[in-house]
Image (cartoon, grey):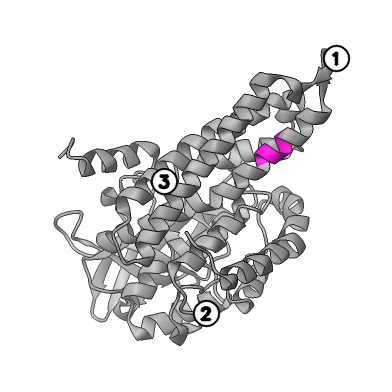
Amino acid sequence: MLFTPEHDEMRRTLQRFIANEINPHVDAWEAAGRFPAHELFKKLGSLGFLGLERPEAYGGLGLDYSYALMMAEELGGIRCGGVPMAIGVQTDMATPALARFGSDEVRREFLAPSIAGDYVACLGVSEVGAGSDVASVKTTARADGDDYVIDGGKMWTTSGAQADWMCLLANTSEGAPHRNKSLICVPMKARGVSVARTLDKLGMRSSDTAQVFFDGVRVPKRFRVGEEGKGFVYQMTQFQQERLWAAASSLKAHELIIADTIAYTRERKAFGRAILDNQVVQFKLAELQTEVELLRSLVYRAAEAIVRGEDATKLATMAKLKTGQLGRELPSACLQYFGGMGYMTETPVSRAFRDQRLAAIGGGADEVMLQILTRMMGMAG
């Protein structure tokens, strides 16, 4: 991936924003269980960071995917996982299908204010009985004249308690589960929408995550994204961007953990010498840094394919798989070298240990990534 001076200037702007507007507040937001999404997103929107690759007609900058990749990578400099994840939902998870397939009317109503930071978006796919198995979602959107009437519920909804609208995947007809679903933009203040509870999570503590119910929620059919029955296909397209975003956003986060570990083990003494003086520690940290660089190469290669207009499904799936695996291995290894302090919640490595565990589950579990890859390699039907 060849970055230009324009990329570098935007990168520096984002780094300053993170240093001044986010990282000083992360500990307080983690303790509170949420961050002020509307306030933060409005600032990001004013700088153009919520619509880097979105059409200029809706307030975006109309740039190519390499700029979105740059942003995802820099978000790894935030010293928690919850805030960058919520930003990623806004830019790379809840809005890509709307930007690509939505009508002009629905894009002006939901995409434009999301790019500006006036609206907070959330994604409604997972349910209590349907996480990685997207085809089995039960929420329905029954046609009634010019409206849909929505019943059901969504689980593990990032930003669900603060969101203004949801990109909802629901069954709009009977029939084959891959052809009976649609994506619909649902205002969270619509009558019948209720946030049942915010969830108490192992990690990602600063991101409010909600369980949402729909009881006879009526929205106009014009809020549908693209064609009826194409929702599953549209969501699979969104997933590819989400999975690559997850990989890109982990890179700098991993490097910060390694740097923290080097600094701590250089100062921490045991048996008369610094922990870092042990060759086994040095070698392990060198191996982990190498793994991060290998993942970066894979992410950049997938991003280059997207910029060229090529299908990056296989590469993005591999990157997501590797991200989940490294998210388990790297924080765990580094935490071990912190000893007892690694087990304390006040230590950044313990937060990373909790936050990065989600990478192997969210956006499609590791096992789903392996299923996709085995099919693409001709090993499974």
- Circles 2 and 1, Cβ within 8 Å, touching? The answer is no
Q: Which mark is residue 319?
A: 3
Query: Which of pointers 2 and 1 indicates the residue nearer the eye?
Result: 1
Label 2 neighbour load within 10 Å: few <14, some 14-19, many 20+: some
Q: Which of pointers 3 and 1 lies earlier in the amino acid sequence?
A: 1
What secondary structure is found at the residue carrying circle 1? loop
Task: Tell me the amino acid under the disc marked 3.
Answer: Ala
Q: Which residue is mark 2?
A: 113
Task: Tell me the amino acid under the disc marked 2.
Answer: Pro
Q: Position of residue 159 (x, y in %)?
A: 55, 59
Query: Which of pointers 2 and 3 indicates the residue nearer the eye?
Result: 3
Residue beneath the point at 32% across and 40% down:
368
Please indicate, yes or no, whether residue 128 appears anywhere in the rendered image: no
Q: Which mark is residue 73?
A: none
What number of labels is visible? 3
Q: Which of pointers 2 and 3 lies earlier in the amino acid sequence?
A: 2
Q: Is residue 259 magenta?
A: yes
Residue range (magenta): 257-261
Q: Which residue is mark 1?
A: 272
Alpha carbons under labels 2 and 3: distance apart: 31 Å
What secondary structure is found at the residue carrying circle 2? helix
Q: Residue furthest top?
A: 271
What secondary structure is found at the residue carrying circle 3? helix
Q: Position of residue 60 (x, y in %)?
A: 49, 79
Q: Is residue 137 magenta?
A: no
